[in-house]
Image (tube, grey):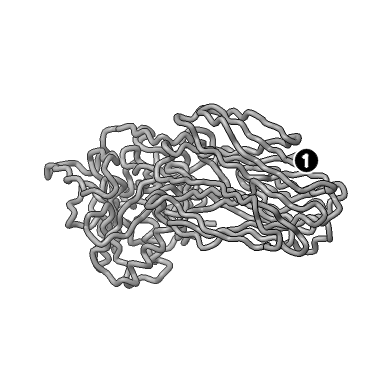
Amino acid sequence: MAQNIGDSDSMRDMCIQFISPQPRLDMYPEDGPLPEPVQQSAAADRTKTAPLTIVSLNQPSIIGPAPHPIGLALPRYWFWRPGRTIRVYFMNGAVALQNEVMGYASEWEAVCNLKFQRVTTAQAEIRISLADGNGYNSSVGTSCYDKPSNLPTMHLSIAGDQPMWRRHYVLHEFGHAIGCVHEQSSPAANIVWNIPAVEEYYGGSPNYWTKDQIYLNVLHQYTSEEVVNTTVDTTSIMAYKIPARLTLNGFSMPLNMTLSDIDKEFIAKMYGWKRRDVGMFRTMDMPNRQQFQQTNIQKVDFYPPYLSTEPRIAMALNWIDCGERHGQRIRALEDKVTTTGMEVHVDSWSDTALYGGGVSWMEFESTDVRSWQNPAHPADDTKTISFDTAFQNVPNVILFLRYVDIDWNTGTRLRTWTESVTMTDFRVHINTWSDTTLYDGGVSWVAYDPLNLPAGLWVESGTLTNETFPTNQQSHSGSITFSPGKFEKPPTVLLGIPYFDFHNMHGTRMHVDYANVTKDGMDWFFNSWADSICYGMGISWLAVGDKA
């Protein structure tokens, strides 16, 4: 819930948004020198907006219905590229205050596919002055390129402010820095201004704005051709406090202190979701679970909620504990998936003695990294899976076991793998060997094109197998090394089971997990326990993160 301050004159020191009168498309390398500022005549009318320039963001989610009206407005010609790393340089100020600013700014970074990187030179898109006396203002989006590199693109005179106000100003100014304009400037704003009252209000203390400044920052309204917007969000961090006495139709807005839910959703819609959430559910953690309880459910809320369609979910069993002399049956699945949440199941059935089970999952919104739940297969089955849309190159495909049903009188053995992967389809195998009776099995799969990933994203995956475990050794571990220099920071990881081989006269007990994830690699481990005898096992892993 957004926090706001009511109609009070106790705090009305407003920000000025600096806007270039010419388009600035984000076409410059992230680690290169800044472009030369556009030379403009002294008579340039900075209260007028730039000519319309259409920018293709290659983000299909921009178009389409949303679960509720979305506010906020972004000029089409001051967008950053989705996935862009935006450099931030502090020209002055105490280190502790600089750290605090970056902490508040990360609230924007957390909900969209942009990254703020702190640097130590003025070769930075955002250059911040924390010196007192310059107020609160920022260039809008890529119009920062029109400021010479020896000048700040953002002023934050926040040293003497309380933390609540420091956070407010940082969130508001960084909203400008990623391309947002003032909410009352949206073409959807139905405001009938009381012009004399507005000029008196903003022209007085503490702002003392000129009429030109008041026009640009308060009265100016963009057209629908110039900005991407829908309805006005009066709870937006980009909204000015507008007392009702400044309008002739009773319109008003409070001074908001936090990002609103619509702020988060809209900026994620424009730049793509940064998050790829993972989760885990273990039946052992359920309060009041009965022994051998067969239906085990956990409700999961998505925050923030997804846009117009529910996410795709990749499910991976990572914990199985089934008693001996009963069918080895366990199933992980998602149910009732909506844009706001889902139910996760770890279930068994028939005579199975399920002491415990666990599943991990990863959520995907991007259509360039695809997941799917394969229906159950009979033993030794092969199936061709067709992609919804063809990839541009042959994708990598990784499998995770989510469902198994094996007779207890025979060895507990299962193996999954892929073959014949093309740009349009692949073949998946789920089978067993020796005397095992496999009734059913099921997998999740994730496919991605390593040569054509979404901007700012890097993905790696792999499978490890060991089919010759010593029968008296129940703990196994190792490490995985990621491709050098590919991940900017530790990625999100999904880890599961593609293969196992257990003795049938003892319980099937296994747990796979990972630890110590860095941008360079991670550790994995596999455990069995009690009387279980494991002859072999496998691990499938998927790492998704920011590209370096």
Which residue is nearer to you in this view: 45 or 463? 463
> Height in image: 39 above or below 131?
above
State the image coordinates of residue 62 (x, y, percent, origin top left): 46, 36
Q: Quadrant of residue 129?
A: bottom left
Query: What kind of element bears circle 1?
Result: strand
State the image coordinates of residue 179 (x, y, percent, origin top left): 35, 46
Instruction: Please name the amino acid that badge 1 sits on.
Output: Leu
Which residue is nearer to you in this view: 80 or 467? 467
State the image coordinates of residue 373 (x, y, percent, origin top left): 65, 38
Q: Quadrant of residue 272?
A: top left
Q: Residue at x 43, y 45 (%)?
A: 457
Q: Residue at x 72, y 40 (%)?
A: 432
Q: Residue at x 50, y 35 (%)?
A: 395
Q: Quadrant of residue 255?
A: bottom left
Which residue is nearer to you in this view: 160 or 361? 361
- Residue under numbered circle 1: 438
In the image: residue 403, left or right of residue 142: right
